[in-house]
Amino acid sequence: MPAATGSNIETPCALCNKPAALTCSRCRAATYCSAVCQKAHWREHKQTCNTANLDQTVHRAGALLQKLVLIWCEHAQTKNITSIQDTGAHLLLRQGPCRPDQFYPFPRHLVKDEAQKKMALTVSMCSESLAYFADILSQMLKGT
């Protein structure tokens, strides 16, 4: 059973409905007024806790994988992007001459924010490059 940690917002205890300031440290979903209530509620809370913890693990793994893919795309850019135009509905990327055996630096100065950067980096991603990350994701989720 994970220990409860302090919480900023008081909500009812999951067992006795008294004001609770402790939160399950594993799932952060159940609140308790004391360690005694948490221990007494564990058998009932265990399944929910395991599911919530798995959901959090998968979410964190997905977010980390997304960051890795974007870093990969930024540093392994095979397109020589020379301009990016935002039409409001679309981003238009223009590219200059490029060689197939060369990487090009991503032109950060051409995007106005992180959302545009993400769009520009992922527009030409192919499934082959994503396949390289399958092993990484498998390792991240190992044992879940």
Image: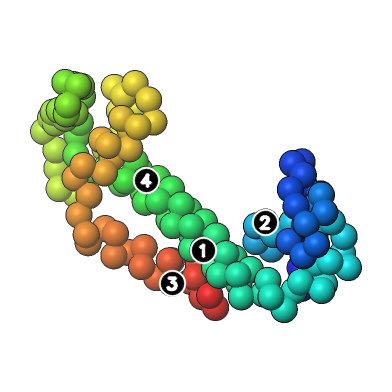
How far apart are the alpha carbons under marks 3 and 1? Answer: 15 Å
Read off the residue under disc 2. 28
Q: Around disc 4, counting alpha carbons within 10 Å, would you say few (fewer than 14), some (14 to 19), or many (20 or more)?
A: some
- Can you give x and y, in whole percent of width and height, for residue 97 in the image? 11, 33
Check disc 1 and give the amino acid type: Asp
Q: Quadrant of residue 35?
A: bottom right
Q: Amino acid at mark 4?
A: Leu
Q: Secondary structure at mark 2?
A: loop
Q: Which residue is mark 1?
A: 55
Label 4: state its secondary structure: helix
Q: Is residue 101 left or right of residue 19?
A: left
Q: Amino acid at mark 3?
A: Ser
Mark earlier in primary sequence (4, 2): 2
- Label 1: how many residues lie within 10 Å, few (<14), some (14-19) or many (20+)? some
Closest to the observer: 37 or 2? 37
How far separated are the C-alphas under marks 4 and 3?
Answer: 18 Å
Q: Is residue 70 left or right of residue 45?
A: left
**Residues under labels 4 and 2: Cα distance?**
29 Å
Which element is circle 3 on?
helix
Label disc, if present, on residue 138 of the rendered structure: 3
x and y, in percent, of residue 81 in the image:
20, 31
In the image, which disc is placed on residue 70? 4
Q: CA distance from mark 3 to mark 2?
A: 25 Å
Quarter of image, res 8:
top right
